Amino acid sequence: MNENTNIEVHPEMTVGEILRNARTTGRRKREIQTISKQLCIREEFLQALEDGKYELIPETVYILGFARNYAMELGLDPDEIVMKLKREMGLTVDDEDDNNSEEKPQSEEIVKENWYKSLLLKIKKFVRHNWLWLSIGAGVVVIAAIVLVVLLLPKSDVENVNGDGNFTMQVETAVEPEYKVAVRERFGTENTETASVILQATQESWVKVEDSRGNTVFSRVLVPGDIYYVPEGNGYTAVFGNAGGVDVWVNGVLAPKQGADHVRVANISMSPDRLLPSAEPVE
């Protein structure tokens, strides 16, 4: 504690003036920064006490507690400072009884802890008084999220509501044929869920597929067993270097050969209707 016990205090001086005078005119002048570290009270709170700007400190109990600690550190009578401060703030006797806890030292950490507790209590009170609307809002958010997920699922369709009111999700996928040759390697797998046309090499053959603008989407020599899933949509055409060595499957049905063995055939439409007009998807 400082040795400022003999500092003269005039009745007309405010608490802030008394505190500043004790800090700056005693035998050992001190900086607010130094006292702030010793008391664990923020500098701006100590400065607010000296300036009389009490509204900058969260609550009355902290104002009085900080003032008491500051007075004790400066060698002043803490009870006299607190009583004078109460008169300046216009506190009544009832206010004093309600704020007995201001006699206890209050650090910045305690201020923060009480602020968090106060916020938590406000949140609990809000939830308690608005639980019905909050529940409805949460339900709306959940339903909206489910609808969004359903809408974003690729090529999915929700149908067949059963007797219990449950939905059965049906997802369209490519029909895998009963290939004549065991599958060796798959290409174009990004199209597996939508492809109506699947090519499989039964002999080594060069295969190229182009879109409606003539852009090549696939070009490779396929060896027996290799398959390629053709993208869904009209306008795709293919070139077979060995037309007799490529099986064309449409919705699980084998279409007629597009040419003889070792014969190059170009501009082959990959439209299911052109390849196999009567083909129906295999259930």
Image: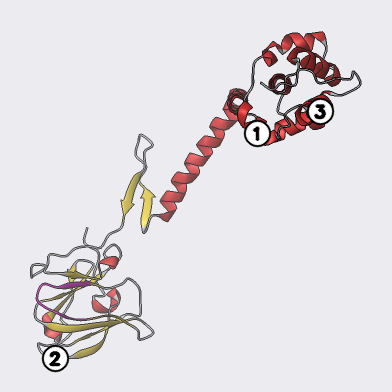
Q: Which residue is mark 2?
A: 263
Disc 1 versus disc 3: distance between alpha carbons? 16 Å
Labels 1 and 3 touching (C-beta < 8 A): no
Q: Amino acid at mark 3?
A: Asn
Along the viewing direction, whichever of 125 and 191 lies nearer the viewer: 125
Q: Earlier in the sequence, mark 3 or mark 2?
A: 3
Q: Secondary structure at mark 1?
A: helix
Looking at the rendering, the stretch of residues picked out in magenta corresponds to 220-228
- Let me know if residue 25 appears in the view: yes
Q: Are marks 3 and 2 in contact (CB under 8 Å)?
A: no
Q: Nearer the viewer, residue 141 or 170?
A: 141
Which picture quadrant has residue 58? top right
Of labels 1 and 3, earlier in sequence is: 3
Quadrant where the C terminus sits is bottom left
Q: Is residue 107 left or right of residue 95?
A: left
Residue placed furthest toward the right: 12
Queried whether the magenta region covers residue 221, the answer comes back as yes
Under mark 1, the amino acid is: Thr
Query: Which one is earlier in the sequence, the residue at label 2 or at label 1?
Result: 1
Relative height, residue 22 to residue 237 (above, below) = above
Q: Residue at x 12, y 64 (%)?
A: 178
- Dot 3 corresponds to which residue? 21
Circle 2: residue type = Val
Asked which quadrant contains residue 216, the reply is: bottom left
What residue is disc 1 on? 34
